Amino acid sequence: MPKHLLSIADLSRREISELIAEAIELKHKGPSSLLAGKTLALMFEKPSLRTRVSFEMAMRQLGGDAIYLSPAEVGLGKRESIPDVARVLSRYVNAIAARTFSQDTLEVMAKYASIPVVNALSDLEHPCQALADLLTICEKKGPLKGVTLAYIGDGNNVANSLLLAAALTGVNSRIASPEGYAIQDRIRLLAEGYARESGAKIIYTVDPQMAAQGADVLYTDVWTSMGQEAEAAERRRVFAGYRIDSKLLSQAKKDVILMHPLPAHRGEEVADGILDSPQSAVFDQAENRLHIQKVLLARLLG
Ligand code: CP
Ligand code: NVA
């Protein structure tokens, strides 16, 4: 395992497969004392429900502890420099999970921390989400290789990590985003390299209907991510044709599953009610954050 998890690209295909296999096994086991005496600092520049609670519960269920530092308390780079925060926390706790605006903040933190740093979402990536997503797909669809996932929406942090994770593990991706909101070239290039090795096929399009055709998994995320609130009205206009509704759902396979990292803006990226339909996997997906992070923490700290 790498020391830090800042990007899905920090993991190999084998490491991802092992994490998923261990999470499936661990799901049926009770609490343990594997991380007794260990503490995780959760340092968040943005709000969170799932990430914060799943990391805190993961530490508790493994016999360890967690300390949450809210956006107001942190003042990263304002009250105190990022290197100093990293160095000080390294004297108190055993790992840091940080949710930041900039990926650079995480990189600097990892450089100066003597303990593991985990990306709990940045503007560039959300690797813990992508791992939970693969675990969910694996549980619902069996072996990942050859599964076809259609991502409809913004080429954002969630999309970046999901595409990289899919390309690494042989999941075919069809990404439908409006012009100007596609996944950035650097991530595409990386994903294409992984896909050549895993055999995954990747298609980029502006046409959500085309992307959804015959898909095993339909995935979407909010049109306006945290920090982009000023663009919300413009984004609602641009993304209006990219809502997952019953028509788009009917293009996919009959046994398609619907995925979303949550929080959802019901009525925007998903028609209201769709997240409550039998095809929706979103709450299993949310639960799986806990299981995959337990395995991840055990590996990084155990
Ligand atoms: N999916 C996810 O990361 O949710 P939170 O923003 O609530 O942590
Ligand atoms: N793309 C979203 C994901 C939230 C879990 C955001 O960054 O706000």
Image (cartoon, grey):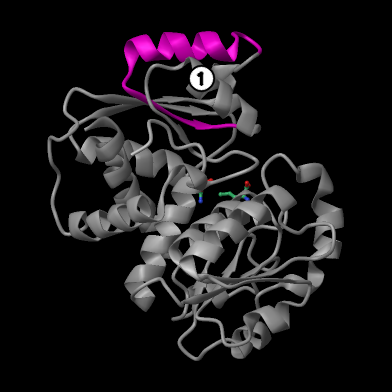
Residue at image position (50%, 80%) is 216
Quadrant of the image occupied by residue 4: top left
Seen in the picture, residue 83 relative to 20 is either above or below; the reply is above
Q: Nearer the viewer, residue 168 or 178?
A: 168
Confirm whether residue 264 shows in the render.
no
> Is label 1 in a helix, a strand or a loop?
helix
Q: Nearer the viewer, residue 119 or 225?
A: 119
Seen in the picture, residue 93 relative to 271 is either above or below; the reply is above
Residue at image position (21%, 33%) is 302
Instruction: Give yes or no for residue 98 being in the magenta stretch.
Output: yes
Quadrant of the image occupied by residue 88: top left
Highlighted range, magenta? 78-100
Give how far across and how far down residue 50 sits, in percent: 44, 47
Give how far across and how far down residue 32 sits, in percent: 13, 41
Give how far across and how far down residue 2 sits, in percent: 38, 36
Confirm whether residue 36 shows in the render.
yes
Instruction: Give yes or no for residue 25 being in the magenta stretch.
Output: no
Seen in the picture, residue 158 relative to 170 is either above or below; the reply is above
For disc 1, the marked residue is 111
